[in-house]
Amino acid sequence: MGIRSYQELEVWRLAMDGVKRVYQLTGNFPRDERFGLCSQLQRAAVSIPSNIAEGHARDSTKEFLYHISVAMGSLAEVETQVLLACELGYTTQGDIGELLTILDRIGRMLRGLKKSLKAKLL
């Protein structure tokens, strides 16, 4: 039996965990970053599970693939912004280590899902 809901996808659940961790991390950023890096990082993080969900809800494998690609782009954005936040001194390597591990795992899962979806198109 196939997956009926995006909520059954392990990658979606992990991405939701990643969003929560990003919100916790950005809660410690300077107040003057509230509308800058903090906001951008939160939006990019939310985009990952949102695009997984939207793609799953679409009527075609091709559209699902497109949304997985968008999620992968948002993932790269989040990784970059987390590293930038560390370089700017808003957080430490110790604070972002676990988040980066989760983001890496999400990336591997998205690549696997993308490969599987591409195989369905053949």
Image: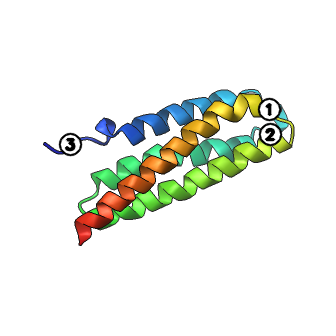
**Circle 1: residue type:** Thr
User: Dot 1 corresponds to which residue?
Assistant: 92
Residue 81 falls left or right of residue 16: right
102 and 37: which one is in front? 102
Q: Is mark 3 on a helix, strand or loop?
A: loop
Nearest-to-viewer mark from 3 and 1 = 1
**Taking the image as drawn, is residue 36 in sight?**
no
Residue 32 in percent (x, y) is at 84, 37
Q: What element carries label 2?
A: helix
State the quadrant of the N terminus.
top left
**Pointer 3 or 1: first along the chain:** 3
Q: Which residue is painted at 37% across and 47% down in the image?
A: 53
Residue 114 picture location, percent across and down: 38, 59
Say whether residue 68 is visible. Answer: yes
Dot in front, 2 or 3: 2
Dot 3 corresponds to which residue?
4
User: Label 3: how many residues lie within 10 Å, few (<14), some (14-19) or many (20+)?
Assistant: few
Residue 86's disc number: 2
